Image: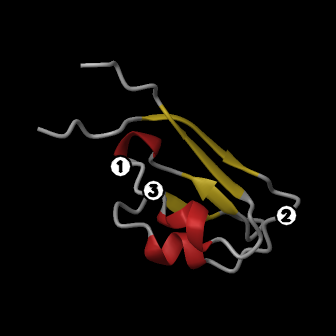
Amino acid sequence: MKKQKKLKEYRINREWCKGCGICVHFCPKDVLELDQDGKSSVIRPDDCIVCGFCERLCPDLAITIIPEEQEAA
């Protein structure tokens, strides 16, 4: 049985983020929203399933997700 990854840290480089909203649109768990400055912001980190869509689809490479280390079986 495959263990689901858990989020350790979510990093958004606000200087690189242009607020296109791609990460917000494609997040299956609605973890992200655009804030009052029009930048991507983590609103519900506990809901993150570490799918990596946001990180892979960000055209500005502004998002880095860091999963918790997996314990060896």
Return the residue at label 1.
49
Q: How crowded is mark 3: few (under 14 residues within 10 Å), some or many (20 or more)?
A: some
- From this view, report whether residue 67 is shown above or below residue 29: above
* Apparent side of residue 1 relative to residue 52 in the rendered image (left or right): left
Please, what secondary structure does the residue beneath circle 2 have?
Answer: loop
**Which residue is pictured at 35% across the width and 49% down the height?**
49
Q: Position of residue 23 (x, y in %)?
A: 56, 70
Q: Where is residue 35 in the image (x, y as percent from the top left)?
A: 67, 63
Q: Position of residue 4 (x, y in %)?
A: 26, 40
Please, what secondary structure does the residue beneath circle 1 have?
Answer: loop
Q: Looking at the picture, which amino acid does disc 2 mark? A: Trp
Q: Residue furthest right?
A: 15
Distance, label 2 to label 1, CA atoms, is 24 Å
Q: Where is residue 21 in the image (x, y as percent from the top left)?
A: 61, 77
Distance, label 1 to label 3, CA atoms, is 9 Å
Distance, label 2 to label 3, CA atoms, is 19 Å
Return the residue at label 3.
31
Please, what secondary structure does the residue beneath circle 3 have?
Answer: loop
Q: Residues within 10 Å of mark 1 (few under 14, many from 20)?
A: some
Q: Looking at the picture, which amino acid does disc 1 mark? A: Ile
Assign the C terminus to one quadrant of the image: top left
Mark 2 and mark 3 residues within 8 Å of each other at the beta carbon: no
Return the residue at label 2.
16
Residue 29: image quadrant is bottom left
Which is more N-terminal, label 3 or label 1?
A: 3
**Which residue is pictured at 39% across the width and 39% down the height?**
46
Q: Looking at the picture, which amino acid does disc 3 mark? A: Val
Which is more N-terminal, label 3 or label 2?
A: 2
Closer-to-camera residue (22/52): 52
Number of numbered discs on residues:
3
Residue 18: image quadrant is bottom right
